[in-house]
Image (cartoon, helix red, strand yellow):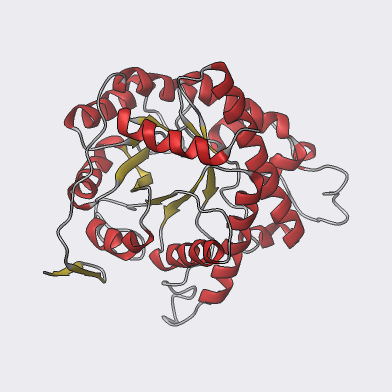
């Protein structure tokens, strides 16, 4: 296994030279494999010990069908991706409680997901040393939020408290680090307070001696309102998380490239770090499927690259290796955005930003 610090240095160097490319959707590609209930189980995850349906718990495939996970890493790297995510989007003790998984199971999924992603990145780097590949530890949102009520009739109702969310993310971060990822990707953030719990967990673990890794933070603007589900606009969200000194900030999911553009442009104007985006393949149709063709997604993202507002691009729901291949062609040779330099000021955030020079 290669030296992780050396590869991280290559990550920073590559980000200055070109627009980096993330992989695309995992869920849609796993669905296309036609996996059945038995693929989501093995001797350990038997129906007697783990009752109910396991199909749909895609993260568990890191343990039960690692060949499928490696196949997807390979497909995206072959399409031109620089970065591929671990298959651990929902691998926290809180989210996995829906499937009655134990804490050991959750940690095992993160260890396995990280090792699979790292092995694929190393393999493809050996194939093309001039294009190093990187494994990003996927840390998705929880199914329980700190900022929003779980009961429409009780605004104060919460299913979790901050310490529980912090602990769940702490467990995941530690396991991903031990498994060998090159960076963390806190993604599809709908609740900024949940994200801040993950940030605190990362900072605390590093203060205790865990290897320091780059952090990529990706929020989700839920609709045309231009706000996250917990109500923040782009600049307020940035002000809330900039203390983490992220390697990259940006947005993913919910919107296609066309509708996401103004929010990425807004991030580009205020963020003194890299700006990243991985939109959906347009908006879902009546059947919940995505119709936007690879050349359509790539055409829109290619414009962003020409305008100089992005450093990292990729795809979320509905995107495939063909989308990533088309985006790679559209951005080839175009320079990355130059991060801005912010003057010193006190920057605060509620739902809106507040700045005092």
Q: Is residue 241 above or below residue 223?
A: below
Q: Nearer the viewer, residue 163 or 151?
A: 163
Q: Is residue 294 left or right of residue 100?
A: left
Q: Residue at x 41, y 72 (%)?
A: 147
User: Residue drawn at (63%, 42%), measured in percent from left and top?
Assistant: 114
In the displayed structure, would residue 109 be above or below residue 204? above
Q: Which of 181/149 is in front?
A: 181
Q: Is residue 235 left or right of residue 183?
A: left
**Where is residue 104, by image quadrant?**
bottom right
Quadrant of the image for the N terminus? top right
Residue 76: image location, x then y, percent: 52, 25
Give the percent coordinates (x, y) of residue 298: 32, 24
In which quadrant of the rendered view does residue 257 lie? Answer: top left
Q: Position of residue 135 (x, y in %)?
A: 54, 37
Q: Residue at x 36, y 27 (%)?
A: 292
Is residue 32 visible to us here? no
Q: How many marks on residues?
A: 0
Q: Is residue 247 visible?
A: yes
Relative to 304, is 168 above or below? below
Q: Tell me what residue is drawn at x 58 percent, y 58 percent.
A: 210
Residue 132, given in percent of the width and then of the height, sits at: 49, 26
Determine the image quadrant of residue 74: top right
Q: Quadrant of the C terminus?
A: bottom left
In the picture, measured across the screen, residue 235 lies left or right of residue 91, that is: left
Q: Nearer the viewer, residue 280 or 170?
A: 170
| Residue at the left extreme of this rendering | 357
Left or right? Give the position of 46 relative to 350. right
């Amino acid at each position: 296994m290669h030296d992780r610090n050396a590869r991280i240095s290559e990550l920073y160097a590559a980000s200055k030279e070109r627009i980096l490319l993330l992989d695309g959707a995992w869920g849609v590609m796993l669905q296309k494999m036609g996996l059945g209930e038995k693929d989501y189980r093995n001797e350990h995850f038997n129906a007697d010990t783990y009752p109910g349906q396991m199909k749909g718990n895609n993260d568990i495939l890191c343990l039960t069908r690692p060949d499928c996970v490696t196949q997807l890493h390979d497909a995206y790297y072959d399409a031109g991706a620089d970065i591929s995510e671990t298959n651990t989007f929902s691998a926290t003790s809180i989210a996995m409680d829906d499937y009655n998984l134990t804490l050991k199971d959750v940690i095992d999924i993160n260890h396995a997901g990280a090792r699979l992603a790292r092995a694929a990145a190393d393999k493809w780097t050996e194939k093309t040393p001039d294009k190093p590949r990187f494994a990003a530890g996927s840390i998705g949102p929880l199914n329980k939020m700190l900022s929003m009520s779980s009961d429409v009739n009780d605004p104060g109702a919460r299913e979790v408290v901050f310490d529980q969310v912090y602990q769940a993310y702490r467990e995941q971060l530690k396991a991903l680090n031990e498994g060998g990822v090159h960076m963390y990707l806190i993604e599809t953030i709908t609740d900024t307070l949940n994200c801040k719990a993950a940030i605190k967990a990362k900072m605390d673990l590093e203060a205790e001696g865990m290897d320091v890794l780059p952090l990529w933070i990706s929020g989700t603007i839920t609709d045309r309102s231009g706000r996250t589900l917990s109500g923040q606009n782009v600049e307020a969200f940035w002000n809330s998380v900039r203390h983490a000194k992220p390697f990259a900030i940006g947005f993913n999911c919910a919107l296609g490239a066309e509708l996401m553009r103004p929010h990425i442009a807004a991030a580009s104007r205020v963020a003194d770090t890299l700006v990243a985006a991985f939109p959906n393949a347009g908006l879902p149709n009546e059947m919940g499927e995505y119709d936007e063709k690879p050349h359509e997604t790539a055409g829109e993202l290619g414009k962003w690259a020409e305008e100089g507002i992005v450093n990292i691009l990729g795809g979320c729901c509905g995107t495939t290796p063909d989308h990533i291949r088309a985006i790679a062609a559209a951005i080839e040779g175009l320079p990355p955005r130059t991060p801005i330099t912010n003057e010193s000021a006190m920057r605060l955030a509620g739902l809106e930003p507040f700045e005092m020079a």
